[in-house]
Amino acid sequence: MAFREFPEGFIWGVATSSYQIEGAWNEDGKGESIWDRFCHQPNRVASGDTGDVACDHYHRWVEDVALLKALNARAYRFSISWPRVMPEGKGKPNPKGLSFYQRLVDALLEAGIIPFVNLYHWDLPQVLQETGGWPNRDTVERFVEYADLMFETLGDRAPYWITFNEPWVISFLGYADGMMAPGICDYTQAYQTAHHLLLAHGKTVQAFRERGNRGSKIGIVLNVEYPAPETDSPADRDACQRFLEQYVSLFADPLFKGQYPQMLMDWIGPMAPKIAPDDMKVIHTPMDFMGMNYYTARWVRYSPAGHLKAFVSPRTMPMSGYTEMGWGIYPAGLTAMLLHYHENYGRDLPPMFLSENGCAARDVPDENGVVADWERIAYLRSHFLAASDAIRAGVDLRGYFVWSLLDNFEWAEGYRPRFGLVRVDYKTQRRIPKKSFEWYRQVIVDNGLWE
Ligand code: FCB
């Protein structure tokens, strides 16, 4: 047994997002978001669950910061609800919303926890969806205006900023699959959304630099799944390549190389996004770090049936198990994807963070509500070691954020899947740290773990 130590100063943290934990959906002047609207429609979310109350974090944030402190977390990644601070999506800010985030950031700093401020975790103001949402180029300008308001408000104290969480999910689950808000099924809109998110990211990075950011850093968070061809046939290998382009290169190539992957663009033909002169240059603006979210892996096989989704095989990989989401457990995929970035983008790639990783587990509470979540501990353990493998292979990985601090609203799946290190009893809002909380705390204290 060897002890795997992480690099000195490695940033261990946890992540959450506004809609999944805050609740208070219509309090203190907050505007409606596309997720409020989506959840209030019938048959969108499992069991009719909504984020109206969620973990009531808006009222219980003091207790939640105390939990972060008890965990010994070095960093906390959370998101700002755009409609809470700018209810109309533009123009007049909401002082009560701004003050909520000011108090939160101050309390984190006071507790010695580094805030990672994420500007967008999917809750677009509904008013902006009514003018076309992300496929409308105007939304790009609205976003930069909102981002600038947050730089103005928190720029003097927040050292790390994230423009977008998972543009792939926003584009394809929101605008092509309709599984997530705003629930639209149109690939052309989805590709245009992807382009506008990238453009909004580039413009925001430029606005951030113009403010003279005094050593603070800005980046983006991209999600990946590790794909492997189901057989060695050229057709399956091509399909796998296309899957990688659709998931990874569609976003990473413009960000780090200043161009879209040509094979993918040719293949999608008329669905390809409209690009104005200079857009690619703006998107290519250098950033300070990149976050990668990793949960699972899958086989890919060729299908003559056509559409992108047809390339994903229903067969599963030889996983070491499945989480409560039904996602295959495949830690080697985490190492492989970090190396994929490292090898493909080389010197254009900024330092990386594992910005989300974790699992929904069975989580059976005992009579005191305590959860001995060995499955979660095993999952995290194997993925921490996989990250350490990548560091040994040369990846410049600076930190790791476990998803999530609390059980919370898991989007279209509602409250059934529980991802937290802390159990939330939704009836009483009582927080009960699970075994994994104690275990992770020790990893943080030791800056590493035994193999
Ligand atoms: C990611 C999301 C996060 C959470 C996890 C399980 O895709 O960014 O909000 O739902 O999945």
Image (spheres, rainbow, N blue to C red):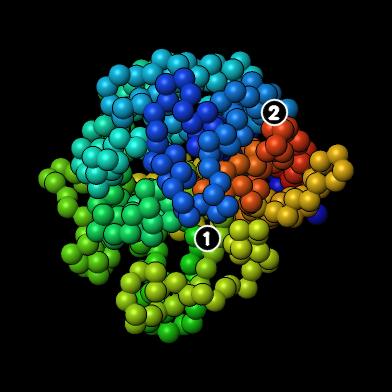
Give the CA distance from mark 2 to mark 1.
33 Å
Q: Is residue 98 left or right of residue 250?
A: right
Location of the N terminus (image quadrant): bottom right
Closer to us: 45 or 300: 45
Please name whichever residue, 320 or 342, is drawn nearer the observer in this view of the structure.
Answer: 320
Residue 218 visible in this rendered orientation of the protein: no
> Within 8 Å of ligand 1, the CB of disc 2?
no
Asked which secondary structure carries label 1, the reply is helix
Q: Nearer the viewer, residue 149 or 160?
A: 149
Residue drawn at x 38%, y 60% is 177
- Up the image or down, 306 lies above or below 350; here it is below
User: What's the amino acid at mark 1?
Assistant: Ala
Q: Quadrant of residue 5?
A: top right
Tell me if I can see residue 60 in this picture: yes
| Residue on which the image places disc 2 | 67
Q: Looking at the picture, how far across and down is residue 50, in whole percent?
A: 53, 42
Residue farthest to the right, as pictured: 367
Q: Is residue 130 above or below residue 387?
A: above
Q: Amino acid at mark 2?
A: Leu
Q: Position of residue 214 (x, y in %)?
A: 39, 19
Q: Residue at coordinates 68% horizontally, 38% vertically from top-left?
A: 426
**Pointer 1 residue:** 336
Secondary element type, mark 2: helix
Examine the image and state in which quarter residue 406 appears: top right
Q: Residue at x 31, y 27 (%)?
A: 88
